[in-house]
Image (cartoon, coloured by chain):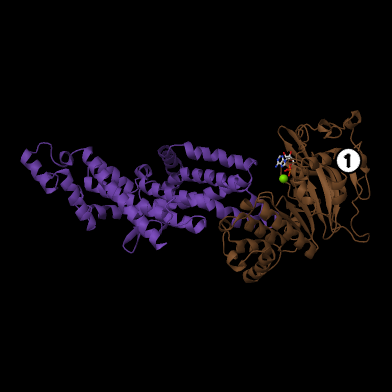
Chain colours: A purple, B brown
Amino acid sequence: MIAFIIQRLLQGAGVVLAMSVIVFVGVFAIGDPVELLINPDADQLTRDAVAHSLGLDQPLWRQYLIFLWSAVHGQLGTSFVFNIPAIELILQRLPATLELALGATLLAITIGIPLGLIAGLFDNSWFSRVIMAGSIFGFSLPTFWVGLILILTFGVWLGWLPVFGRGETVAVFGIEWSFLTLDGLAHLALPVLNLALFKVALFIRLTRASVREIVPQDFVRFARAMGIHPSRVLTRHILKNIMIPIVTVIGIEFGSVVAFAVVTESIFNWPGMGKLIIESINQLDRPVIVAYLMVIVVMFVFINLVVDLLYAVLDPRVRLGSTSR
Amino acid sequence: MTEPLNTMPENEQPVLNISGLSTVYNLKIGQVKSVTDVSFELARGEILGLVGESGSGKSVTGLSIAGLITAPGRVVSGSVLLHGQELTTLSENALRAIRGNDISIIFQDPMTTLNPVLTIGQQFFEVIHAHRKCSYSQAMKEAETALIEVGIPAPRERLDNYPHELSGGMRQRVCIAISLINKPSVVIADEPTTALDVTIQSQILHMMQRLVRERDVAMIWVTHDLSVVAGFCDKLAVMYAGRIVEAGPVQQVLSNPAHPYTAGLMDSIPGDCLPGSRLEQIPGTQPSPLQLPSGCAFRTRCKYARNECAEKPPEVAVGSGRTAQCFFPLTEVQNVRRK
Ligand SMILES: Nc1ncnc2c1ncn2[C@@H]1O[C@H](COP(=O)(O)OP(=O)(O)O)[C@@H](O)[C@H]1O
Ligand SMILES: [Mg+2]
């Protein structure tokens, strides 16, 4: 167990290192931030001075080594634009995105899994067909369009919910949270719904498929043949088996919401990481882009580790540390 | 109608009394008559061998008795009396209380019958807890005893194992122990040894025989293998295309089969053949269950068939407690010549 975690952490470190090279070179290739940062009329001397102050006059490999050296010391560079440490900038925005991602994932689980169960257990009934037809919409409607429709419907026509920003926040341990105030919750509602829609559809389909796979199996028939109550067969025998694929997808989906909440955050003007990264790309704020991507990579490595550990908890056939997986 | 098979003491009421049981599957392509007009009786401690080719309706018979037929299948007629109580009209909940408690089933494939994510102990607990109030530790005590009875060494450790940690033979022993844990009076064993290799097969066979005798359980032993029933069962019922075509005490049926299908099955057992002589095979294949021949379903493959066989064959008594559904049951003379 401990050996497995250490092994995975080392592997993760390798992934992070490899990603850092790719990200660094990739971002370097996008363009020269000096052009964007200074007055186009400035002379060469000013340019050189700016480039030198930002460390951009160094060769790429040296820039990378400097980056690596400071990364080891917890510094991922200083934002060209805001002139504060990039990592600080990102961590400031992280709670807002986490709030969205957690909300969307929770909503998707609490709606998607029960509906998927119903659709899987009562496969031929009309309500199962309605659920499945509904899930096709969730899958195929583009997020930005749904976001706009939500704004139009609930924000503009009905005027029920705010569509801009985080609303009132409360600080807990120095971090601002929206979900602890009523106003903040109202602000959360639409973006969370927007982000959750696709995932609700995904969980419906995933749960249904898993149920349909498990129900005809012999051990479910045996449980019924032994007179175990249907509700118990569901919770103890079916659910426990379908949680194995579902947990994996929850992990991946949570990661992807955090990483790619960009569209929703832009539409609802949500001051999260997604919005920050879009702004930073526009301004070629290299340290922020690099730091953001590194944070995302670390997050995915961490999520994968947690999913693997949960896997081993849920499925006794999985052995931690075996290299065959 | 069907005459009961009389191998039980006169005064004793049969534990299980099946009469006229018919089950169909309504599929889009048509109606499959999986089980038609099946009748038999079973007394305490008695073992009935239910034999027939695969697809003949043996499993569906077992499931119908336990009330486990699900859509698109349906029990269309007949009665199942357990201790004189009619089961076919019971509510699902009342049936559930009987299943796993008074009637138990053992399935064919031990590799898939146990839940992969629950320990053996938990699976025992599930089945005990479904029928009576019982603490987990009390259930584990019972489970341990049950595992010893089915010949599993170090039972306490096994209780903490998951199914994948046990061998196939071990798992089938566990399944048997689980299905017997609530002391049922009827056990339906649906080819429980088919998936196992031969040595383990015979071990399990002997163990089952001992348990059934010790506990006075009535058992239906479903198999497609006529060679195992001889020393093991009391009675034999031979199924073909959903019907019991011949039934009776096992020795008499085997030594002197009345239905040509039974004779055909026996001739195709390799072990009973004289060395060097040709292994007989029943010609042709089973008819499609969607389009059974009129009258006797076996007539298309039967070398004794005549025109009359297109009518529904009568059920004739061919000896004490023996019946055959045939116009022209084989005589002893014919059987001697057959060999
Ligand atoms: N769930 C089902 N759906 C449709 N047909 C079925 C189903 N179960 C059994 N049958 C049909 O019923 C007949 C008898 O099957 P079964 O009792 O399983 O045979 P066996 O004697 O091999 O146990 C077969 O023709 C089979 O196709
Ligand atoms: Mg079968």
> Ligand 1 appears in which quadrant?
top right
Q: Where is residue A114 in the image (x, y as percent from the top left)?
A: 56, 50
**Residue found at the far top of this picture:** B307
Q: Give the chain of mark 1.
A: B
Which residue sits at x=46%, y=42%?
A198
Viewer-nearest residue: B57 or A99: B57
Residue type indicated by callout 1: Asn
Dot 1 corresponds to which residue?
B335
**Mark 1 surroundings: few (<14), some (14-19) or many (≥20) residues within 10 A:** some
Please give left or right for residue B109 compared with residue A11 in the image: right
Which residue is nearer to you in this view: B221 or A186? B221
Q: Is mark 1 on a helix, strand or loop?
A: helix
Asked if residue B27 lies left or right of residue A207, the reply is: right
Is residue B125 rendered to the left or right of residue A280? right
x 37%, y 49%: residue: A258
Where residue A229 sits, quadrant-wise, is bottom right
The x, y position of residue B102, in whole percent, is 77, 60
Q: Nearer the viewer, residue B203 or A97?
A: B203
**In this rendering, does residue B19 appear at all?**
no
Q: In which quarter of the image is the N terminus of chain B?
A: top right
